[in-house]
Image (cartoon, rainbow, N blue to C red):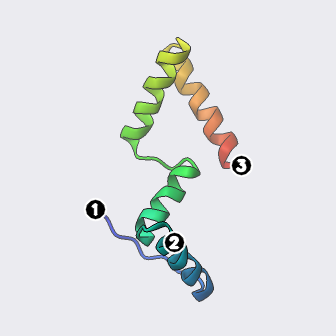
Amino acid sequence: MSRITISITNERHKALKAAAARRGKTIGELVAEGLEAVGIKPENRVAELLAKARARSRLSAAAAEKLAVEETRKARQ
């Protein structure tokens, strides 16, 4: 597993630590959930989501990928 160092304010660190404790999670788990919530997902997870979308919508692989990219861009704005 990779490690990363980020700089945040002391107030934000305290809030993050408290939120993690309330949820019974580590700060890393909470950050990972936040990243997924804004659309930053591992490549294999994206492939799973595309496969589900194709199966449900009966879209071609190209059409499903195009739709996924469009929706991800909208969500990130």
- Whether residues under marks 3 and 1 lie with C-beta atoms below 8 angstroms apart, the answer is no
Residue at coordinates 58% horizontally, 34% vertically from top-left? 69
Q: Which mark is residue 65?
A: none
Q: Which mark is residue 77?
A: 3
Q: Which mark is residue 1?
A: 1
Q: CA distance from mark 3 to mark 1?
A: 29 Å
Q: Residues within 10 Å of mark 3 (few under 14, many from 20)?
A: few
Q: CA distance from mark 3 to mark 2?
A: 29 Å
Q: Note whether residue 58 is visible.
A: yes
Q: Secondary structure at mark 1?
A: loop
- Whether residues under marks 2 and 1 lie with C-beta atoms below 8 angstroms apart, the answer is no
**Quarter of the image holding residue 43?**
top left
Q: Is residue 67 above or below residue 7?
A: above
Count the numbered circles shown: 3
Q: Earlier in the sequence, mark 2 or mark 1?
A: 1
Residue at coordinates 52% horizontally, 11% vertically from top-left? 58
User: x%, y% of residue 16?
Assistant: 54, 75
